[in-house]
Image (cartoon, rainbow, N blue to C red):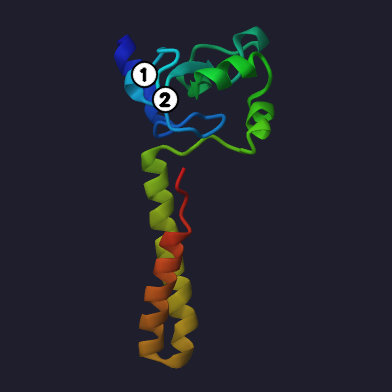
Amino acid sequence: MDKQERIKKIYYKTDGYCHICHKKLSLSNYGKRGAKGAWHIEHSKAKANGGTDHLNNLYPACISCNEEKGIMHTQTARGYNRQTRAPYSKAKKQKLKNQNTIGGLVAGAITGSIFGPVGALVGGVIGGAIGENNSPKK
């Protein structure tokens, strides 16, 4: 894998958001200090603490978050930004949205079935909409 491909793979891991503060990043502004959405590749587990350059340890982070984090644990840095996890990739968000929609549809249909077939249909539609609406945005 070449350098540009690796950078894109890391960027899309979080759908282009900083894994620490969840700020939107710009793929084209990788390493461009001062540019809007500028970012670095950040080691979730710092190399100084035994982290590696393996892809599962690398995440996109805005330059200020990367520099402020230093060698502290990722959970601590996210906590300072009131975040508990990295943003989901686009594929993961779509999968969760599908699961929530189907789950809401089934729960709504079961609940609505108390009022007969029409109630099941209406309940399913409402439940599906609620499930889709409650899906993660990041």
Q: Mark 2 falls on what kind of element?
A: loop
Q: Is residue 61 above or below residue 129?
A: above
Label 1 and label 2: CA atoms lie apart by 6 Å
Quickly name the residue at label 2.
37
Residue 112 makes an appearance in the image: yes
Residue 90 x/y as whole percent: 37, 40
Residue drawn at (41%, 54%) of the image: 97
Q: How many marks?
A: 2
Q: Does residue 84 appear to the left or right of 16 in the view shown?
A: right
Q: Mark 1 falls on what kind of element?
A: helix
Query: What amino acid is labelled 1 in the image?
Result: Asn
Residue located farthest toward the top when viewing the structure as drawn: 48
Q: Which mark is residue 29?
A: 1
Q: Which badge, 1 or 2, is on the more N-terminal residue? A: 1
Residue drawn at (60%, 9%) of the image: 47
Image quarter of residue 16: top left
Q: Are marks 1 and 2 in contact (CB under 8 Å)?
A: yes
Q: Which mark is residue 111?
A: none
Query: What amino acid is labelled 2 in the image?
Result: Gly
Image quarter of residue 26: top left
Residue 123 x/y as whole percent: 42, 79
Residue 31 x/y as whole percent: 42, 12
Q: Residues within 10 Å of mark 2 (few under 14, many from 20)?
A: many
Q: Residues within 10 Å of mark 1 (few under 14, many from 20)?
A: some
Residue 132 x/y as whole percent: 41, 60
- State the quadrant of the N terminus: top left
Residue 1 makes an appearance in the image: no
